[in-house]
Image (spheres, rainbow, N blue to C red):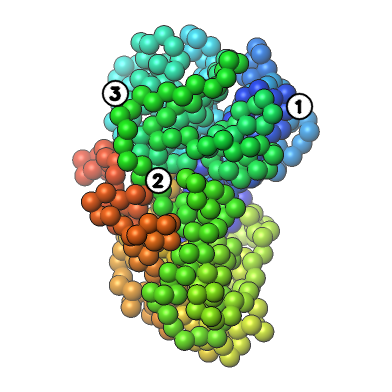
Amino acid sequence: MLTTNPFDDDKLREECGVFGVFGSPDATALTALGLHALQHRGQEAAGIVSYDGEDFPAHRASGQVGDIFGSEDVIKSLPGHRAVGHVRYSTAGGKGLRNVQPLFADFEFGGLAIAHNGNLTNSLAVRERLVKRGSIFQSTSDTETFIHLIATSLYEKIVDRLIDAVRQVEGAYSLVVMTQKKLIGLRDPLGVRPLVLGKLNDAYILSSETVGLDIVGAEFIRDVEPGEIVEITDDGLRSIKPFKPQKSRFCIFEHVYFARPDSIVEGTSVYDVRKHIGRELARESAVDADVVVPIPDSGVPSALGYAEESGIPFELGIIRNHYVGRTFIEPTDQIRHLGVKLKHNANPGKLKGKRVILVDDSIVRGTTSTKIVDLVRQAGAAEVHMRITSPPTMNPCFYGVDTPSKDKLMAANHDIESMAKIIGVDSLAFVTIDGLYRATGLEGRDNDNPAFCDACFTGDYPIKLTDHNAENKDRKLSQLVERQSA
């Protein structure tokens, strides 16, 4: 029996979500609520570590937040006025329980718990250097690299050790770190991965998205800046900027798909950006049709924007079942063939005899798109046109997103006309890269100085890929393989 949904393998998987609370007697409960709001960022595992004044109680498990932290007894087992939490999709390191975060370690200065969102692109190189110096790794997650760099640093203060550690790594990351005295948040120098700061009464809160603040009733203060370290203690908040300022390269796919539509990222409403993308699509690739139908849920705001701009009616021609996170059916070939109907079902009354525009956020492998188009045609659609709210996904992400290799990315191996034939649509169009940038409020993409990380579309990787060059691509982090229990 599977514990994850085998019918939803055609999306880019967001890397992780992090959350931290300092200064509340309900720190663990608030963290569990915050993780619940960030569940969309990772549904394989979750964990919380708290500090009760003496010890660091921890609870980590595979599964979703409600299943893991839905019990009052579990919350009470994690006392304290500060806590740090994490929800996870595995990118680097695999799915074993040893990789479930937050990770914890004892140092000479005391305990430290760390939650990490993103990926290091030189983790292998740094890890090999540390192993030669005597470090013993217990996980295959690149997050543990931070722990060993902190442990081997010769600086005295924890913040100085952390600065020393992040100066040695490359990649995209947001970190939330907790010690006996502090809660620390930081972002990579280019700000690829998100992190926001909020306040609830006298408590400070760190979260991957503003929806984490909303769910607990916290006030949004600001984004943690690229390359910034915020240090929270009983004396208040201190900002440290150890890196030379660089132009931000925030991940543009947060606007397209990763972030919740009710989040505010980098000062911009995700919902509004997605509606603007739909409008751009309607202007760039208009087609005569009777209805605009979103592929739920991520396609809904953009489909609304497309409908408003084009004047074509918006209809919910596909209905999503929200209760398929885990399947109870052994996925035989026959069940896999039917599997898309577990998540999506056609609404025939809105599709039969109609020329339909389907709006979705991306095409990765193309398998789900093909099945949904078939579903719509079986419901009687006269024509099916597909419009995608991101440019073609041509390249894998190495910055914390679980992306198939290039040979499995449909757009990297087929032109748009061929993709349309494979998927089975009458026409297929993607928003242009300039259209995507315009939807965020810019005039277009400045190719000499882009405002976002868009490497999955353009191949323009803003951070070195040390572990992924030709010399290193076949080397592994670990030979240990964990067997998952049934």
- Amino acid at dot 1: Lys
Residue at (63% x, 31% y) in the render: 199
> Is residue 306 depicted above or below 197 in this figure?
below
Front-lying residue, 424 or 431: 431
Disc 1, disc 3: CB below 8 Å?
A: no
Residue matched to label 2: 250
- Amino acid at dot 3: Arg
Q: Could you say whether the residue bearing mark 2 is in a helix, strand or loop?
A: strand
Q: Position of residue 355 (x, y in %)?
A: 52, 86
Q: Badge 3, how many Cα within 10 Å: few under 14, some, many 20+?
A: few
Give the spatial CA distance, label 2 vs label 1: 37 Å
- Amino acid at dot 2: Phe
- In the image, taking residue 173 as reference, residue 70 lies left or right, namely right
Residue at (53% x, 89% y) in the render: 382
Lower sequence index among marks 3 and 2: 3
Residue matched to label 3: 129
Q: Badge 1, how many Cα within 10 Å: few under 14, some, many 20+?
A: few
Question: Which is more foreground, mark 3 or mark 2?
Answer: 2
- In the image, taking residue 327 as reference, residue 383 lies left or right, namely left
User: Which quadrant holds residue 316?
Assistant: bottom right
Give the spatial CA distance, label 3 vs label 2: 30 Å
Residue matched to label 1: 76
Lower sequence index among marks 2 and 1: 1
Give the spatial CA distance, label 1 vs label 3: 41 Å
Q: Position of residue 18 (x, y in %)?
A: 55, 36
Q: Quadrant of the C terminus?
A: top right
